[in-house]
Amino acid sequence: MPRTRLASIVVLCLGLIPAAQATDWPNRPLTMINPFAPGGPNDVVARLTAQRMGEILGQPVIVENVGGAGGMNGASRVAKADPDGYTFLQGTVGTQAQNQTLYRKPAYNALTDFTPVGLVITAPLVLVVRKDLPVKDMKEFVVYAKANREKMQYGSAGTGSAIHLGCALTNMVAKLEILHVPYKGANPAMQDLMSGRIDYLCDIITTAKVQIDGGTVKPIAILSKQRSPALPNVPTAIEQGFDVDAYTWNAFFLPKDTPDDIVTKLNQATTKALATPAVREKLEAAGLVIATGETTTPAYLAKFVQSEIEKWEAPIKKSGAVIE
């Protein structure tokens, strides 16, 4: 056989290999990287969706927690993974948007180092205050905070956390200058709010709801555009005249250059998992908003991440939170 013809056949065969691999995907277990420690709200979402996605795909989806650096350690691992569809990221507003401004030298480019799969959920933040703070709504809160700014403090799960930046955005809109007290996690911050050591917190609804229902803290506003069915009597900040839209979100991402048909299959498994009644019931009971329709598409997620990076740039710079 002439060498030129043999070479052409080899090149053709090599070109067909990725297509064959993509066609029979998945034929072994997948790994979903959750870039935070076990036990938190992100872990709950990861494990609920992973179990059902594994059933749909016919292969186990194993959740691996890779924490550190505000989620960048886990996200960076996925950015550097082979684009074969077997390792994907449960990214968040922190890992894919806020960290791009928060860190002086991010470990990756959130727009170019990943392939978007689809949005999973959004979770509104809630402005909660100590139960004896003498305010009942957003306007009274802002008036009180401005009059008592020198003695007030707000807490967070740490500098640059979604909880911190949610309050940073709220403070920027309301023109408040209040001392920030970072904690090592949301739980100790909530404990100090309950005991009156700090004055307010912008917590994720999944963790705030328990304390609100128990009467240990006082809700002032839902910090997203719409009221939450989980707390239907709590008005939004926007309803009360303050243009604050602060929430966390979870979405799935593959490494860049992942074949389109793998992206499509993983996206379809995601939407089917989210449509499963048992999964929906548990996520909605926690106050989470499940992505539907256009918001579940890779194209929407790509644009969404870009808009989120732009949205959080101003409050992050205003807060002065920069991490080396």
Image (spheres, helix red, strand yellow):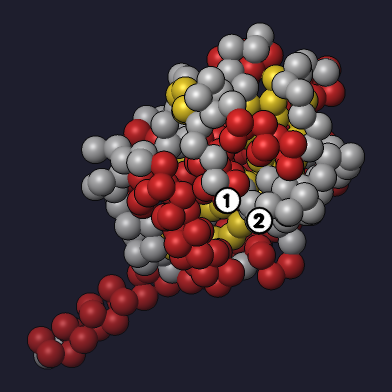
* Residue 29 image position (x, y, % from top left): 51, 43
Cα distance in 3D space between marks 1 and 2: 7 Å
Quarter of the image that includes the C terminus: top left
276 versus 282 height, above or below = below
Write the residue at 57% across / 50% down: 173
Write the residue at 81% across / 32% down: 136
For disc 1, the marked residue is 173
What's under tag 2, amino acid-wise? Asp
Quarter of the image that includes the N terminus: bottom left
Q: In the shown orientation, is residue 206 left or right of residue 73?
A: right
State if disc 2 and disc 1 touch (CB < 8 Å).
Answer: yes
Write the residue at 43% across / 68% down: 259
Write the residue at 77% across / 29% down: 135
What's under tag 1, amino acid-wise? Val
Inspect this view and state whether residue 34 appears. no
Q: Residues within 10 Å of mark 2 (few under 14, many from 20)?
A: some
* Residue 17 image position (x, y, % from top left): 35, 69
Q: In the figure, residue 255 lies in which quadrant?
A: bottom left
For disc 2, the marked residue is 243
Please identify the residue farthest to the left as the structure is shown. Answer: 3
* Residue 317 image position (x, y, % from top left): 37, 49
